[in-house]
Amino acid sequence: MMYQPRLEPWSHQQKALAKMEGRSAFALLCAMRTGKTKICYDDFGRLELAGEIDDLLVIAPAGVYRTWETAAQEHLSDDLQKRSLIHTWKAGALARDDRLLEQFLEENVRPRILLVNVEALSSVDRARDLCIKFLGQRRSMMAIDESATLKNWKAKRTKFVIKHLAPLAKVRRILSGLPTPRSPLDLYAQFEILDKNILGFSSYVAFMKRYAIMRPMVFGGRRIEIVDRYVNVDELKAKIEPHSYRVMLEDCYDLPPKMYSKREVRLTPEQKKAYREIKDFATTMLASGEHVTATIVIAQILRMHQVLCGHVGTEGGKAVEIPELRTAELLSLLEEYDGKAIIWASFDLDVRRISGKLEKEYGEGSVARFWGGNRGSREDEEKRFLTDPQCRFMVATAAAGGRGRTWTCADLVIYYSNSYDLEHRAQSEERAQGVNKTQSVAYVDLCVPGTVDEKIIEALRKKIDMAAVITGDNYMKWLI
């Protein structure tokens, strides 16, 4: 029996559309699977039909932006589909693609939709110039999907969007299920893209001083300020409330509960030796240092975590493998399971090792990968995972596959390794969730007891952002 929706799927979407009506700037803070892409397309459709908007620019992460092309076929009205032209930006486009782009830009009657990956705005001049030209041609809506990717107000791409693109867009939308992955301060740049009057600050410094208490530290001979605690958070929520719509997946559907467990992993003698040396060195170094920052502590935690995964970094930055039992434990776990599974790994070396071992054990074609090392083929591999019964395993990094993917065919999710990034964990957990799920998803963390593995997993499961809570006063409890 299917789990019945608590609300009809269109109910909360209609509420969002009603709330954003008449607003040129609006934030769709909707969790994965609640239909924020559909809401955005419906919004564009009604504005285009009313003669207020001609075009739509969608900026999204590399792992997501192409999905907007197929989503258009699902969510645009039949009439708008027939009339619309869609162009997807491609790095290193061929001559044929350039000709199609020229024709796309010359169109002045039909509505147009341009899809661009946000990473291209960091350094690719052609992508930047294209967005400026497109927005400047006609009345346009600009939608930033997974807008937390632009939370860093100092980043080149964030500055570019705020300074050059936002003023050209008649209507601006940001879409995010997790707008504050690290801290409330992440809202500043995202709402600057929408409308600087919403928050009402002339600079990030002024915004930060209102909502965070800072404390000075000296590091490397340089005086810096770090966040001590956040204040006036309710005031901040009140400011953005009229200009945003928030909905969680559980608000819309009765979902089966998530099931969490750990799988203990033993260390090899080589790992024990390397881990002890790094731990002793880190503890000694940090204890003797006059000033300790979260960045330093997290760097040491990640080095220790790498050893637990079976590799260490040399002084030259090269990863060297050491004997490990983690992969054997993964294979042992999968012996007890006969369905499809998603395996998340934080390091490229892990992805290669896992996929190689799985193919050796389960045969060629049993594994799909989605990571930075297979950008050219990962869409095809994803399709194989979704459609081929023989392809049982998706091995991915959260940085590449954690956003915007629908892998609900899997009922088992294994975290071979975790990063400290709360956003990566929260987003990746949702890949296997869906409104059509009738079976609980099992989440299994591979973990070495009594190590930083436990600290990382505990923090992520409790939705604690390590970078925000580690301070110079409490670093010992994270390392030991």
Image: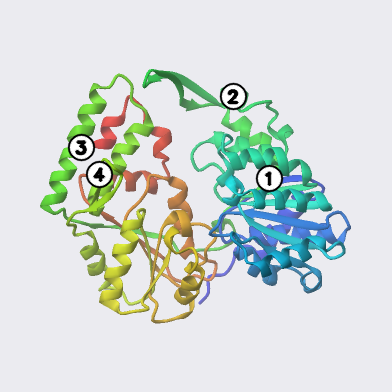
Residue at figure coordinates x 81%, y 72% from the top left:
79
Q: Is mark 1 in CB contact (under 8 Å) with mark 3?
A: no
Question: Can you tell which quarter of the image residue 474 is in?
Answer: top left
- Badge 1 is on which residue? 244
Is residue 381 visible to us here?
Answer: yes
Q: Which residue is mark 2?
A: 205
**Quick one: label 1 or label 3, which is nearer the N terminus?**
1
Front tag of 4 and 1: 4
The residue indicated by pointer 3 is: 279
Three-letter code, disc 2 = Val
| Residue 439 location (% of width, % of height) | 43, 70
What residue would you read off at disc 4? 314
Q: Is residue 247 above or below residue 351?
A: above
Work out how far the residue at label 2 is from the one at label 4, CA to CA, in angstroms: 38 Å
Q: Are marks 3 and 4 in contact (CB under 8 Å)?
A: no
Q: Where's residue 46, x and y in %?
A: 81, 60
User: Label 3 sits on what residue type?
Assistant: Lys
Nearer the observer, 192 or 122: 122
Report the amino acid beneath label 1.
Answer: Ser
Q: Indicate the secondary structure of the residue bearing disc 2.
A: helix
Label 4: few (<14), some or many (≥20) within 10 Å? few
Earlier-in-chain disc, 2 versus 1: 2
Name the disc covering residue 142, or none.
Answer: none
Q: CA distance from mark 4 to mark 1?
A: 47 Å
Q: Nearer the viewer, residue 257 or 172?
A: 172
Secondary structure found at label 4 = loop
Tell me the quarter of the picture where residue 357 sits.
bottom left
Q: CA distance from mark 3 to mark 4?
A: 16 Å
Sooner in the amino-acid sequence: mark 3 or mark 2: 2
From the viewer's side, name the closer residue of 1 and 32: 32
Whether the residues at callouts 3 and 2 have beta carbons within 8 Å, the answer is no
Left or right: 42 as drawn, with respect to 337: right
